[in-house]
Image (tube, rainbow, N blue to C red):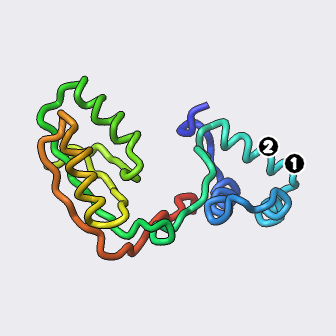
Amino acid sequence: MNCSTMEIDKRDRQLLSFLQADCRISNADLAASVGMSASALWRRVRALEDAGVIERYGAMVNPLAMGLSFEAIVHVQLVRHDPEKITEFERAIADSQDVQECYATTGSADFHLRVLCRDLAAYNEFLDDFLFRLPAVSSAQTNVVLKALKRNRPTAT
């Protein structure tokens, strides 16, 4: 089932909101929070998973606690839009530990990356030893993140 065809009601949104706040919440506590029986809740969560509404579960990790104090948004322009080079670029980005997010967008840049590194020297290595070695990359503009005002906002509400 495709998530665009699944009817998401108010209770589903409430359930998703609780799961986004704490995916480790017990089935019994979640059921009580949304006013469902534990078995009905389990079936509903399973249906949301099967429909692709719930893509995965995970832990939110504090980058600073991991020693990653340098964060940047990198605007990447490609040399040309050769499908083979784009595929190579996309695979390399997907495999990079430094790239946390990547978006193909409209506008002056072809891709926008959110990059986390240990420090400025590590970021320079990322540029020199990785990004600028990709044949499709023409240029990159870096915006250093000074402060995160809003991050990872739940979407179910």
Relative to 68, say whether 88 is above or below: above
Determine the secondary structure under disc 1.
Answer: helix
Q: Pick the quarter of the image with the N terminus.
A: top right
Q: CA distance from mark 2 to mark 1?
A: 6 Å
* Residue ID for mark 2: 43
Q: Quadrant of residue 150?
A: bottom left
Q: Amino acid at mark 1?
A: Ser
Q: Position of residue 34 (x, y in %)?
A: 77, 62
Q: Amino acid at mark 2?
A: Arg
Q: Quadrant of residue 6?
A: top right
Q: Quadrant of residue 120?
A: bottom left
Asked whether disc 2 touches disc 1, contact meaning CB atoms under 8 Å apart, the reply is: yes
Left or right: 100, with 46 as reference point: left
Give the residue at x 68% y 58%. Answer: 23
Foreground: 70 or 80? Answer: 70
Foreground: 53 or 6? Answer: 53
Left or right: 156, with 134 as reference point: right
* Residue ID for mark 1: 39
Label 2 neighbourhood size at 10 Å, few (<14), some (14-19), many (20+)? few
Relative to 24, say whether 145 is above or below: below
Give the residue at x 81% y 56%. Answer: 27
Q: Position of residue 121 (x, y in %)?
A: 26, 63
Give the residue at x 60% y 59%. Answer: 59
Residue extending furthest top?
Answer: 84
